[in-house]
Amino acid sequence: MLKPERPHFSSGPCAKRPGFSLSALEGALLGRSHRAPASRARMAEVIERSRAILGMPADWRLGIVPASDTGAVEMALWSLLGPRGVDVLAWESFSAEWANDITQALKLPDVRLLKAPYGKLPDLGAVDWARDCVFVWNGTTSGVRLTDGDWIAPDREGLAICDATSAAFAMELPWDKLDVVTWSWQKVLGGEAAHGMLALSPRAVARLESHTPPWPLPKVFRLTKGGKLIEGIFKGDTINTPSMLCVEDALDGLRWAESVGGLKGLVARAEGNLKLVADWVARSKWAEFLAEDPATRSCTSICLRFRDLAPDHQAEIAQRMVTYLEAEGVALDAAHYRDAPPGLRLWCGATVEASDVAAVLPWLDAAWGAAKRG
C-alpha cells in the first residue's frame, strides 16, 4: 500500500505546511532584542497578516501573548470575568478545563455548567446572554464543532469568550457574534508552540477598562495599566520575551496561507480532508465518527471510535492500532486524547495534504486487522 509522504497527524503541534524546510527560517532575527524596531515590525506583521486572512473587523485588537492558546484563554478569564454570572459550555477536555478554572481557581459564585458527553453539543438554547459565556468553537479532543453563531444573541449583554485554537484558519468565525477569540500558532498553520493570539472586540476592551478583578493578576496576564488597555501588546510589543525563530516560522505559515487562497483556500483544504475521511467511514465496518451529528463533525481534529466493540476491549485495541501505525511509519501521534473515549484522532487541518489523508485510510484498516489478531 502507498504510504503518506508526511505521516504527521498530531493534533498539536500540527503538521508543518507542505514543502516546509528549515531554510524558510533563515531570515529569523536571531540574537536580536524583541524590542528592536525590526523585531517589533516582524511581530506586527504576524498580527496584520493574521487579521487580514481571518477577516477580523478593523475595530478589534489582536495581540501575541505568552503560553500558547492556554495562556490566551487564561488571560481572558482572569481579566474579564466577574461582573456578571458565567455560563460555561463543556463537551470535551479543554472546555471542561476552563469550567474547572472558573469554579475552582477563580471561585466565581455564579457559574452554570452546560455540559454534554463526548460526541454531542450542549443545549445552546439554554445560554443566558445576560451572562458571560465561555466556550470552544471546535472540540479538539472530541472532534465536535459548532456549526454557526446563530445561537449567540446579537444584542447580548454578556461577553462571548471563544477558544478557537483548532478552528481559526480552518473554519469561518462569526466575528459579529464574538467578543474574545483565542488561538495558538501550533494548530491550523502548523506553527511552533508556546505563543498564543488574543483577539478582543470593542465590547471586551470596554470591559477590561471598566472592570478591576478582585484577585491579583500575574504580570503575564495584565492587559491594562491605570485602567486603560496596554495598546502596545496589540501593535507588536509582547508581555514577555517571544522566540524570534517562532515569529519567523509563524510568518512563513501565514504567507503560505495567502498563497493557497487565504481563508477560503484553507477552509476548502480542511473540508476536503474531512470528506475523504467521511467517505471512508461510510464504507467502514469498524469505524465511526465520535461526533454523532454529521453537521458538527470537525474538519481539523477528526475523532474516530469503534463500532460494535465491547467497551472493555476498546482501549487495548486503540493502543495496538497506534503502535502498528507508528511502527509502519504511516500515522504518527494518532492516539485519542487521554480523557476521550478510546479510538483514533487524525489531524486533517489545512497543512495536511489530501493525498496523505487518502493514503493513510487503508492503513487504518490494516491496523484494525492487526490489532484484532493481537
Image (tube, rainbow, N blue to C red):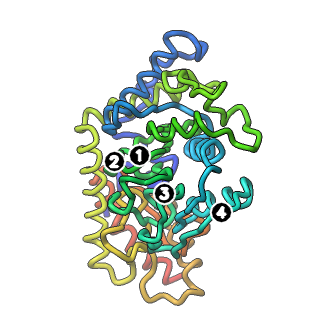
Q: Which residue is mark 2?
A: 350
Q: CA distance from mark 4 to mark 3?
A: 20 Å
Q: Which residue is mark 4?
A: 110
Quadrant in which the N terminus appears: bottom left
Q: Which residue is mark 3?
A: 136
Label 4, secondary structure: give it. loop
Residue 333 left/right relative to 264: right
**Mark 3 vs 1, N-terminal side:** 3
Q: Which residue is mark 1?
A: 188
Label 1, secondary structure: give it. loop
Instruction: From the image, state whether disc 4 or disc 1 is nearer to you.
Output: 4
Instruction: From the image, state whether disc 2 or disc 3 is nearer to you.
Output: 3
Quadrant in which the C terminus appears: bottom right
Image position of 127 with respect to 264: above or below: below
Percent position (x, y) of residue 111?
63, 63
Kindly indicate whether the residue at mark 2 contacts the one at mark 1 (C-beta within 8 angstroms). Answer: yes
Dot 3: few (<14), some (14–19), or many (≥20) neighbours within 10 Å?
Answer: many
Residue positioned 49% across, 19% down in the render: 28
Image position of 125 with respect to 183: above or below: below
Label 2, secondary structure: give it. loop
